[in-house]
Image (cartoon, coloured by chain):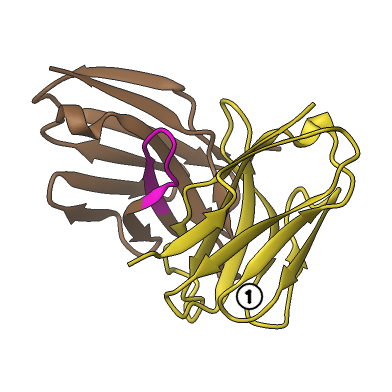
Chain colours: A yellow, B brown
Amino acid sequence: NAGVTQTPKFQVLKTGQSMTLQCAQDMNHNSMYWYRQDPGMGLRLIYYSASEGTTDKGEVPNGYNVSRLNKREFSLRLESAAPSQTSVYFCASSDGAEYNQPQHFGDGTRLSIL
Amino acid sequence: DQQVKQNSPSLSVQEGRISILNCDYTNSMFDYFLWYKKYPAEGPTFLISISSIKDKNEDGRFTVFLNKSAKHLSLHIVPSQPGDSAVYFCAANTNAGKSTFGDGTTLTVKP
């Protein structure tokens, strides 16, 4: 079982470049999330999607956009990358039917912006 | 204002002994708590959870305790094994379903 798949695993960008991080889940989950993790810190929510067709801002949305393409896929876009966006990005999904369902995470995208 | 705090960045224990990881929270609206485990270069994986209507939940070697009045929870691992060496994140949910994470505690279990 693939679970949550993130692509790419690694990426180096120059300041000002744009890119899209891809995420897909095969668990038929309703809710999907994008987090960033900086060194020594926990996961901070960037955006989430409670169900197909809806997206909402999390704790740190500035500089990012998202698209819930369908129930399986949730992408994160950096329009003009900045060094402060160097981080590890995690996508997650959960059943969403009840609020106490654990999240399932991908293995992350390690993004460096020079 | 950090709503979920793990005040110990690291913890080292001997194999076979008990590991106790702590987590404090400030938001009284949190009513479900989860622990995740993370190995290097992997995503977090769910370990154990507890509802605010309980004070203890046990799953094999892992037990989570919740003290609502103190807004404190702890994860006990008994006995600790070298394979338990990882970063442990505490997370708290409101009934809106979003999770707020602590900064993590790195557990090292020495053989």
Quarter occupied by the N terminus of chain A:
bottom left
Q: Which residues are magenta?
A: B34-45
Q: From the viewer's perspective, tell me whether residue B105 is left or right of residue B15.
A: right
Q: Secondary structure at mark 1?
A: loop
Between A107 and B36, the one nearer to me in the picture: A107
Please report the residue visible at 15 percent of the width from the left and 30 percent of the height from the top. Answer: B80
Residue B104 horizontal/vertical position (percent): 47, 33
Question: Dot 1 falls on which chain?
Answer: A
Position in image of residue A69 (x %, y %)? 69, 77
* Residue B75 appears in the figure: yes
**Residue under the point 22% across and 18% down:** B13
Taking the image as shown, residue B46 lies to the left or right of residue A59, namely left
Residue A62 at x, y = what percent?
85, 49
Quarter of the picture holding the C terminus of chain A: top right
Instruction: Residue at 44% x, 23% y: name it.
Output: B8
Say which residue label 1 marks: A50
Give residue A17's quadrant in the image.
Answer: top right
Rendered position, A94 above or below B45: below
Q: Amino acid at mark 1?
A: Ala
Q: Is residue A70 magenta?
A: no
